[in-house]
Image: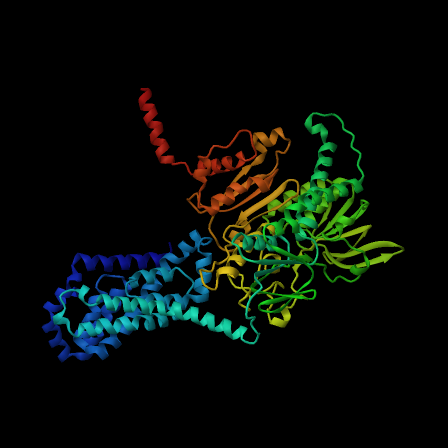
Amino acid sequence: MSKSRLLLVVIIAVLIGVFFAFDLGGYISLDGLRARQDAITAYRDENMLEAALIYFAIYIAVTALSLPGATVMTLAGGAFFGLLWGTVLVSFASTVGATLAFLIARLLFRDAVQNRFGSSLRAVNAGVARDGAFYLFTLRLVPLFPFFVINLLMALTPIRTLVFFLVSQLGMFPATVVYVNAGTHLGKLDSLAGILSPGLVVSFTLLGLFPLIAKKLVDVIKSRRVLKQYPKPERFERDLIVIGAGSAGLVSAYIGAAVKAKVTLIEKQDMGGECLNTGCVPSKALIRSAKFLAQAKNSQHYGIRQTSVEFDFADVMERVHRVIDTVAPHDSAERYESLGVEVVKGEARITSPWSVEVGKRTVTARGIIVAAGGRPFVPPIPGIEDMGYLTSENLWELRELPERLVVLGGGPIGCELAQAFARFGSRVVQVEMLPRILIREDPEVSEMMTARFREEGVDVRVNHKATRFLVEDGRKVLLAEHQGEEVRVEFDALLVAVGRVANTANYGLEELGITLTKSRTLEVNEYLQSRIPTIYACGDVVGPYQFTHMAAHQAWFASVNALFGSFLKRFRVDYSVVPWATFTDPEVARVGLNEEEAREQGIDCEVTVYDIDHLDRAITDEEARGFVKVLTVPGKDRILGVTIVGEHAGDIIAEYVSAMKNKVGLNKILATIHIYPTLAEANKYAAGEWKRAHVPRTLLNWVERYHRWRRG
């Protein structure tokens, strides 16, 4: 604690101590006020200005220090200065005092609270930043809420001081008038409880609810203003129209059908979307075949002197398609039709807030969900269009293994496919313009994966910015800039894996005025609702996480809000605990903060690392590499984030995801029985490492003395 803060704490402690030590509260109690009413009145009559200033200063001190007596002080304002001047004095004194209390609490507590609970308070901070004045005004209107508690709690949030001051003065004014008016009849008051009748309490409560009701009415008015320019159907054919049959669209349709809504699902290409047909499923099938090949080539690690493996890359790709065909029935039109969903093949175009045109048919519904997914982003590098490049969409038509492959991009997709093709025998050059691959992970993760890739033959080139593609004498060449020099890389095939972009064009959104964000996704609110109140969106078209599991997660919120949000409660989408994995070998999985993000955001944390090299199961499987890194609140076992690098990291991290979601700390993970020998034991051992660093040394010293005494 800084010297200035320590001095402030001492001053406040002394003042509060003096208040109670000398029983100053007796002077500002109802009985004390009535006992001294004549003397105070006489002093006021002779020294009006001085009396007002003294009263003003005492009121500020009482409220600034959050001392008991503010209510009686308000009554005193009416008793000694009348309704008009009493109201003026109390209104400004209470606001100044509340603001001082707010500033004191902010100085002493906000940084500590935000550093310790920042991740949990993210949603609260965002809500206050957006609607803090509204929330504060509502609380101030209801005198049942202790004002000193409001001062303290608001101080911990990002609300601006000037906003706090102005809104507090306005919000406290009605109650101030009531109490000051009661003070003008001080002699008739038997107790403070008599000031507010039940009817008056109800009136204040309704007054406090008024802003909430008004906000709802404003939302309704805004919605009607947006919708009034479009003709509304007299009746609706469906309850919900879902555009896109990927993960987000399928889950939206499933939820709609589960609650007995009439749902139409429109898909212009293949059911299952990108994940089934060109993304998660085929890539993991390819990675598994590549891993088997790598294990066979390294058979000596398993006590087998030599193995011989023959393969045809075309057969590998046929297996990939067989896997797709095996999974496809889970996402098929037949399955969803059996659930009661109408599945329509065709290109959708939204023609109004309630209607979608597909082919020659127009379908109407109360709500529309856009779940059109995304596509690979191809950067506008000169000459790239002449390269016949591959992306995660058309890669699966490949039947011949490229001898020399350039992978453009060092993110998860680029890393997964670069390693896989290198294991099949391609000479892979991975080109990344940033200083390291897997830039969203901690530096040691990037370093570990770079070393592994190079060990397996991947030529990883970071800080290389692709500037141009060209063909020379029939040879394809990439020109890249590295440290101010031009680098040439010849190749036979180019795989572009630099990210994805949302599918937001050509289905009517532009005509309806639905805007895009800076990241080129659809702009929606916390309920996944667009500016057109009947149109929601989820999945890759809105981000911010372009994962299949996140698309499914968002779909629940979008569908429930679209179906029931008009009359029942709406639900804000929850991004508090988001896991993901990169399926390289070893896998990289993460949930919550990593160490670099915590440092950038100024979040205090402890870091605990357990090396998987020591895990028995990893040793038996010849997979003894990687680590579990856990970030916790300093001095506590509450988990802020976890990064795991290792075999099946994407599976192992599930325990931490559940722990964070359900507020379970490392102590309980340590106390949980884990089967031996399994990779999941790494979670328990990581918790053990944390516990070892937090053993009570003093207590153990006394226990040691106890044992020594027992031994004689």
**Is 116 placed left or right of 365 in the picture?**
left
Colouring of the image = rainbow
Disc count in the image? 0
- Residue 543 appears in the figure: no
Is the N terminus in the top left, top right, bottom left or bottom right quadrant?
A: bottom left
- Residue at position x 87%, y 56% in the image: 472
Is 130 above or below relative to 307? Answer: below
Percent coordinates x, y for residue 81 in the rendering: 19, 77
- Residue 122 appears in the figure: yes
Residue positioned most to the right: 473
**Is 37 placed left or right of 270 in the picture?**
left
Percent coordinates x, y for residue 389 in the rendering: 78, 55
Question: Residue 88, located in which quarter of the rendered image?
Answer: bottom left
Percent coordinates x, y for residue 99 in the rendering: 33, 67
- Between residues 515 and 488, which one lies in front from this camera angle? 515
- Between residues 40 and 644, which one lies in front from this camera angle? 644
Question: Residue 316, located in which quarter of the rendered image?
Answer: top right
Residue positioned most to the top: 712
**Is 229 placed left or right of 73 in the picture?**
right
- Residue at position x 60%, y 69% in the image: 515
- Between residues 323 and 626, which one lies in front from this camera angle? 323
**Is 5 placed left or right of 557 in the picture?**
left
Percent coordinates x, y for residue 526 in the rendering: 51, 61
Is 152 above or below relative to 75? Answer: above
- Residue at position x 35%, y 64% in the image: 103
Is the C terminus in the top left, top right, bottom left or bottom right quadrant?
A: top left
